[in-house]
Amino acid sequence: MLKDSTKAANGSSLKSGDLFASIDEDFDPYEKYKNLTDLTMSELLSLEKKSLGYYLSGHPVDAIGGKIEKLRSRKIGDITNDIKKASLVCLINSARQIKDRKGNPLTFINFDDGSGVMDGVVASDTLETCHGILKEGSILILKGTIELDDYKSKDLGDAMYRMRVREVHSLDTELERKVREVMINIEKSDLSSLDALSEKLGEIKDDFWAHGSCQLNIKVKTGKSEVIISAGEKFKFPPTLINLTYLEEIFGTNALEI
């Protein structure tokens, strides 16, 4: 290498890898990374869990908070003695199945949403409809009755609650059932005009709009006036978590109002 470096200084071509010769000024080591897009928070957290075994940068439920507000009645941290029923969006931490006295399967689950942790009991009749999705690491909608967990409350010296789970649904199932309209707020996006928005819409492939039930609307402000424009029947899409994330990537996270 030292000999090659001397040759380089004399204008000779290098024969082997040289750690000491001067680097071409036009060489850009980051060239191949220029077109990469940033990871979404959900993608980042997923990779953290796989590599580290835990979430470092946040909580998966918080990462999708803007998309799930219509799916839950409250957060775990907001539950009080007055709450008898609730619809929660939670990360399943563990699921353990046993059999009750009659021999029917009974599943005990532990879950959290970033604001608190709870235990739940899923009876056999409910389990029949959700056994395929009730898995550790899944984010699901849990609906049921809330009761005070006396044992944990005494043990921890604070009010702790548990849920008798009556329904378990996937996020996409509930999103498609409850989300009928999605708004793009041009003022909060990187777009400067309706023409720019039209260009972006034109870049989306036609199959994205196939079998759609959710209407896309556009919010425009001109001075003190605010106008809501429907994008039309052509621009309806299935409001799945993947599709909503895709629209956020195109128009901006803050621009999408669900």
Image: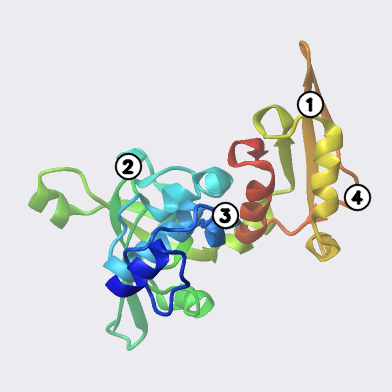
Which of the two labelled residues, at mark 4 and mark 3, occupies the earlier sequence position?
3
Instruction: Say what secondary structure mark 4 lies in.
Output: loop
Q: Of the numbered discs in the image, which one, if any, rests on residue 77?
A: 2
Q: Gap between marks 4 and 2, in whole Å?
A: 40 Å
Q: Is residue 93 visible?
A: no
Q: Which residue lies under the disc numbered 4? A: 233
User: Label 3 sits on what residue type?
Assistant: Lys
Marks 1/3 in contact by CB < 8 Å: the verdict is no
Instruction: Say what secondary structure mark 3 lies in.
Output: loop
Q: Please state which of the two labelled residues, at mark 4 or mark 1, is closer to the viewer.
A: 1
Q: Quadrant of the C terminus?
A: top right
Q: Gap between marks 1 and 2, in whole Å?
A: 36 Å
Residue 235 drawn above or below residue 100 = above
Which of the two labelled residues, at mark 2 and mark 3, occupies the earlier sequence position?
3
Q: Which residue lies under the disc numbered 3? A: 34
Q: Please state which of the two labelled residues, at mark 4 or mark 2, is closer to the viewer.
A: 4
- In the shown orientation, is residue 226 left or right of residue 161? right
Q: Please state which of the two labelled residues, at mark 2 or mark 3, is closer to the viewer.
A: 3
